[in-house]
Image (tube, grey):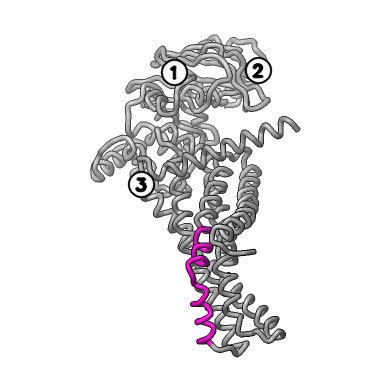
Amino acid sequence: MKKKAKELISDLQDFYLLSYHGLMGVVRRPFYFKDLIEQMDYAGSGSFFIILLISLFIGMALSLQLSAELSRLGMKMYTGKIVGISIIREIGPVLTALVFAGRVGSGIASELGSMVLGHQVDTLRVFGVDPVKKLVTPRILSALIMLPVLTIIGDCVSLFGAYYIAVFVSHQSGTFFWSSIRDILIYENVLAGSIKPFIFGSLIACISCYMGLSTKGGAIGLRRTTTRAVVASFIAIIVADFILTRVLLYVLGFSV
Amino acid sequence: MIEFDRVSFSYGNRFVLNDLSFSVHEDERVAILGGSGDGKTTILKLIIGLLRPDSGKILIDGEDITEKTEDELRDIRIKFSMVFQDGALFDSLSVKENVAFPLREYTKMSEEEIDRKVRELLRRVGLEEAIGYMPEELSGGMHRRVAIMRSMAAFQPKMFLYDEATTGLDPVSADVICKLILDISEQGGGFIIVTHKVFDAFKLAERFMFLKSGTIIFDGDKKKMLHSTIPEIQIFLRELNWS
């Protein structure tokens, strides 16, 4: 028990150190721009269509559920407002981050893990290249840039999906739906929805890089690494979402 | 000169090297033999500071490297050229990019100069036509040849470290690698090769160390090894009777 606690503390310490050095690499030379572009391409354009598809259907499903329930209460006209707040403040950032962790996070962990097992990371060190700057920093930076971009795209597509259901299935007024959306696009809601992707992105990249670089034990170790990276990222996203929501509601003056 | 002074190393609870002491001159051709998990690769990683010993000192040209930082170790590492098992080429880079990697990191060569240098190195090992290939398109022997050329692309190492350079290769490919290693060695610079293939070790080295459970149980030349009565060495020597 004591040994496990020691190992956990040591792992956490290593994780914080790697995250710190990885983030600090953004402002320290050398800069690996080519690696950053490659990572942004992998994280961004690779995830684009998945996010598009999932966001569209989530927006449509949410709109269907709310239209059905609100029409029973005679408040169908609030569909746009509730859907908008849910997507912009909560569902959009969390859903996009979960998809990003599943696709990009697992990819980072397995790629770095196989580089460790194939001695490629050791080779970098032999050549005097800092693996954190070369491998971790571009991945963190690409997650910090691409996750917010994907979240914005996902939010827009979700709202279009919700609009389609509200207007063509639930027979609501399209003009009223968009004016409801415009009404909720206030500073507080936009800020609450746009801070989260930065935090989620850095968490996913740091966790996945740490798991990848601490891979041991061949193919089974690689499988374990990938699974752990995805599971840990999912848990971190959900927990961070709750904490961020609580803090942001307080800071932005919402009463609960 | 490499000097190990009572070096011990363990991975967690598993002891790999136990109170190990030896020294190797930079112009020597040394083969470290032993079974899997006996600590052969660990020795190479300790020499270039990829691992730190639990206790003892490792001196490179009289300088203790055990307490050096990653930045300080850069100066030590450029004295060596390390070729890992299977070559450890970067999967995402082509053959050209792999060989050019240290040139881009360490030199200020123009793209034309890099291209010329890469072609020259690949020509030396008969792989100029494979310049645009990705590592997954190469055979095991080609992998090793590219890795050896990459390891000596940017600087002139004093000594080469080969980790299982011929393991897993067919006899023809293994022979090509052995000739390449000898060819490089004749142009200056000794080497340490870690292997469990006695046949290849005899082709390459002049001094042999045998490692068992983290301890050197034999250190001598070919003649002495052939007459050794140590049971483990005799088991290894049976390979010669088969070949």
Tell me the quarter of the image containing the C terminus of chain A: bottom right
> At x 56% / y 83%, what residue is drawn?
A164
The residue shown at (34%, 38%) is: B105
Residue marked by disc 2: B232
Q: Is residue A50 in sight in this rendering?
A: no
Measure the C-alpha gap from mark 1 to mark 2: 22 Å
Q: Quadrant of residue A83?
A: bottom right
Q: Which residues are magenta?
A: A174-197
Residue A191 belongs to magenta span: yes
Task: Decide: few, some or many residues near mark 1? Use Cα within 10 Å; few <14, some 14-19, many ≥20.
Answer: many
In the image, residue A95 sits, relative to residue B238, either above or below, namely: below
* Residue B85 on the magenta segment: no
Location of residue B118 with respect to A88 vertically, above or below: above
User: Which of B148 and A12 lies nearest the eye of the viewer?
Assistant: A12
* Upstream in sequence: badge 1 or badge 3: 1
Let me know if residue A58 appears in the view: yes
| Residue type indicated by callout 3 | Ile
**Mark 3 secondary-structure assignment:** loop
In primary-sequence order, the first of circles 1 and 2 is: 1
Assign the magenta stretch its main secondary structure.
helix
- Amino acid at the residue labelled 1: Arg
Q: Nearer the viewer, residue B110 or B33?
A: B110
Q: Give the CA separation, mark 3 to mark 2.
A: 43 Å
Query: Residue at image x 56%, y 40%?
Result: A15
- Residue with the mark numbered 1: B29
Which residue carries the number 3 mark?
Answer: B131
Left or right of B4 on screen, residue B212: right
Image coordinates for residue A197, horizontal then vertical, percent = 52, 58
The tag on residue A166 is none
